[in-house]
Image (cartoon, helix red, strand yellow):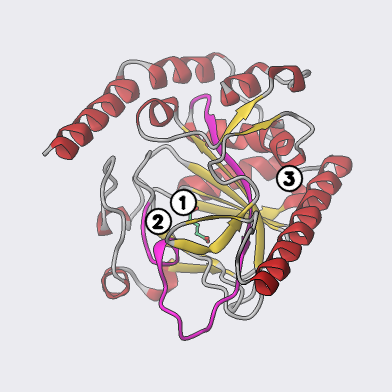
Amino acid sequence: MAKAVENRGIVATYALHEHLLSNRASRRLHESDPPSLNDVQRSALEAVDREGYATLRFDELVTDEALRDAVLAQGADFVASTEAGLREESREDGQGSELRRRPGKEFLVRAHSFDGVRLGLDHAWLRACLSPYLLDVARAYLRMWPKLSYVDLWYTVPQPPEADRVASQLWHYDFDDKHLLKAFLYLDDVDAETGPFEYVAGSQPGGPHHDVRPWKPMGFGRVPEDEVKRAVPDEAIRTFTAPRGTIIFCNTSGLHRGGFATSRARVLATATYCSPASLAALSERNYDVDPSRLSGLSREGRYAVS
Ligand SMILES: O=C(O)CCC(=O)C(=O)O
């Protein structure tokens, strides 16, 4: 009973921020200063508008080589420390591991998780997420100044092929916002056995397959596989096997799943852009910023981390 009342309160707060408060202000900011996109960004925007996702090469999107190299180096450091932690766990039977995993999602090791890490622009992936290369795509797609609610690197540990899919390995939609754009940057090649991200093209709000499970705040997002198979043609299910250096933008308020790696680990950098309403009502940011480490950041970049 108390939980139901609390949920109704959260949903009402979201609606208030979506229609009257935060998102209205953020849409005004966008309208007064829309980004000017280059051809690569524009085609990504058109694809996400049409299909709910876009895939592109990181080096086409981020033309700053030093920034790209810094992100790749950060990914390599994360892999090295994760693999050292996994080796330690296997020696010590899991005791004393520093690896960040969440209950129910033990297959996923995260660089930051929700530990309230303090970040600045010396964090290469954060710097990329707040650069015009990525942030302009997010604000153009959301038609408002977005908030950056989540920044992380993921190492998906392979598991036996006969294991059952759990958590985000199952079809679901994210229930914390309909104005969502996630970025997944593959830091290694991803094939069918490396837990590719999958998406039902057109399941984003306004898309032809959105009615399989229309988005609602705080909705229970899981959808059984047979229901997805019945409701959408096979061609609508996109499986993102792709080489290292591929970036996927996706509105994950549509149907998606991934991370069922069976042969090799999947390594990626990920970020979530959402509307201010979501952060006010439904989402928690997974990091904090150190203002002294943000010098040179644009106005929209500061807004995204505030
Ligand atoms: O790991 C994946 O590919 C799925 C990720 C996911 O479900 C999410 O970020 O919402």
Quadrant location, the C terminus: top right
Given contact means CB atoms under 8 Å apart, are the residues at marks 2 and 1 in contact? yes
The segment highlighted magenta reads: 144-173
Element at label 2: loop
Q: Quick one: label 3, few (<14), some, or many (20+) residues within 10 Å? A: many
Question: Is 195 situated above or below 272?
Answer: below
| Residue that badge 2 annotates | 202
Total tally of numbered discs in the picture: 3
Residue reaching furthest bottom?
Answer: 162
Q: Tell me, yes or no, whether the highlighted magenta stretch contains residue 150.
A: yes
Amino acid on which the number 2 mark rests in the picture: Gly
Amino acid on which the number 1 mark rests in the picture: Gly
Residue 52's label in the rendered image is 1
- Distance of label 3 from label 2 (alpha carbons): 23 Å
Q: Residue 149's spot in the image, x, y percent?
A: 52, 35
* Lateral position of residue 234 relative to residue 216, left or right: right
* Lateral position of residue 298 relative to residue 22, left or right: right
- Distance of label 2 from label 1 (alpha carbons): 6 Å
